[in-house]
Image: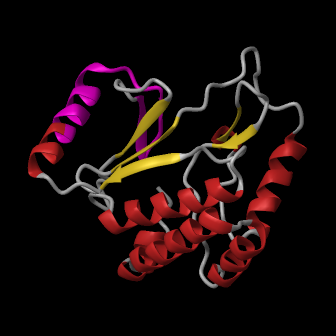
Amino acid sequence: MNKDPKIKSDFEDHIKKLRDIEIPLAGGEQKTVYIDPDNDRRVIVIFRPDSIRGIPSPDLIEYLFYIGKIAHLLFPKNIPALHKFTKYPATITRERVFKKENHDGFDNSIDVKNLEAELVKAGFKTDSTFSDFARDEQGNLKYVDNIYVPDGQWHILEQVVRERLQGKEQENALRYVSRAKQAEDKLNSEQLMQRY
């Protein structure tokens, strides 16, 4: 992440413009999703301050980013690519999922359950909400919300990374595991369970 104050200021101004002008692509209680005006093949997820919990922890945003990077390496057709994150404001920029035309719902909810089962076997946990899944233009089922690693599952994830990935991908994934663990260590369990 670039620490140049001018770039940080420009990005914060960019986010303010998005909030003031652009119509959100999607959103919920915890975040709003906008099309990136500089690249329409990406979206910027802006995490909202919460009246109870306050501003999302910067360490939580970093944790979610690296977990998403690992998940994408393991499931490239099912997890959107993540490109960058910022702590202030709390954002993650990721691949935009162009939903398949004329596709309301899923051909079979079994597809969702199967993908969730594969993610769990790899050591991940999802939100398990059907609205968090979408088919892209190629018909791939994508999980479009945040993903995390439950307590005690790191060894499973690391084993899966070593078994399924090779070379540079494996090296990157193991580095992301290390960074996600460092961010997780800074969080208390309440912050981690916010599931932004």
Residue 134 x/y as whole percent = 69, 34
Residue 191 x/y as whole percent = 40, 70
Q: In which quarter of the image is residue 105?
A: top right
Residue 55 x/y as whole percent = 27, 57
Color encoding of the figure: secondary structure
Which is nearer the eye, 110 or 96?
96
Would you say 33 lies left or right of 70 here? left
Determine the residue positioned at 25% across, 49% down: 89
Q: Quadrant of residue 158?
A: bottom right
Would you say 184 lies left or right of 149 here? left
Determine the residue positioned at 39% across, 63% down: 62
Q: In which quarter of the image is residue 173?
A: bottom right
In magenta segment, residue 17: yes
Determine the residue positioned at 60% across, 32% down: 97
Would you say 60 lies left or right of 151 here? left
Residue 186 x/y as whole percent = 35, 80
Tell me the magenta residue range: 11-35
In magenta segment, residue 184: no
Vertical side of 160 occupied by 45: above or below: above
Vertical side of 37 occupied by 188: above or below: below
